Image (spheres, rainbow, N blue to C red):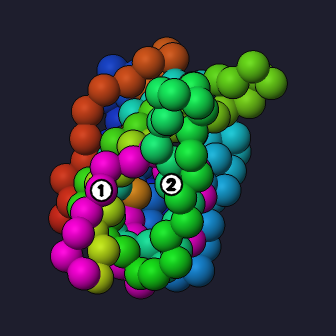
Amino acid sequence: MKSQLVAESAGQRTFVVVLDPGEEAFAQLTSFAVDRGVGGASLTALGAFETATVGWFDPGEKTYRKIPVREQCEVLSAIGDVAIGDDGKPSLHVHAVLGLSDGTRGAVICWTASCGRRSRSHWWRRLAICAAGTVPNSASP
């Protein structure tokens, strides 16, 4: 994982985070948040995952059904946040639209994802708890 601070203004810091092939996206982004003391942030991401585990909420069962994605998939869009969990540590929550090799796509909640060759996560933080905004896709460390 590589990261770079690309902007800082009025208590907000904007980072670009680029994950390397094979890295587990949630572990790396959570580690990034922990290392920098991020208590509240928004994130957007584009790229590709080699594999992923996503979820769909089953209203009848009142629980998430975990769905493995065992192929390279394009991250067409991902949006989420970082907040402090019940354990006092940063917790990542992401919704994504993934494109599959047969041309289908689905909007889901992500739990795990191993990065493909082009995964980039652009996210930023505000030192005061909450945040809002995006980083242009063309930004690169």
Quarter of the picture containing the N terminus is: bottom right
Q: Is 11 situated above or below 41?
A: above
Inter-mark Cα distance, 1 to 2: 10 Å
Secondary structure of the residue carrying tag 1 is strand
Give the label on residue 62, or none: none
Residue at 25%, 41% in the rendered image: 134
x and y percentages locating residue 102 in the rendered image: 24, 81
Q: Are marks 1 and 2 in contact (CB under 8 Å)?
A: yes
Q: Is 129 situated above or below 16?
A: above
Secondary structure of the residue carrying tag 2 is strand
Residue 108 seen anywhere in this rendered image of the structure? yes
Q: Nearer the viewer, residue 113 or 101?
A: 101
* Left or right: residue 90 compared with residue 135: right
x and y percentages locating residue 37 in the rendered image: 66, 33
Residue sticking out furthest to the front: 60
* Left or right: residue 102 compared with residue 38: left
Residue at 51%, 17% in the rendered image: 129
Give the prevailing secondary structure in the magenta stretch: strand
x and y percentages locating residue 42 in the rendered image: 40, 34
Indicate the amino acid at tag 2.
Answer: Val
Q: Is residue 2 within the magenta segment?
A: no
The residue beneath circle 2 is: 54
Q: Number of numbered discs present?
A: 2
Q: Is residue 111 within the magenta segment?
A: yes
Q: Which residues are magenta?
A: 102-120
| Label located before the other in sequence (1 or 2) | 2
* Left or right: residue 27 compared with residue 68: right
x and y percentages locating residue 79 in the rendered image: 34, 42
The residue beneath circle 1 is: 106
* Left or right: residue 30 compared with residue 19: right
Quarter of the picture containing the C terminus is: bottom left
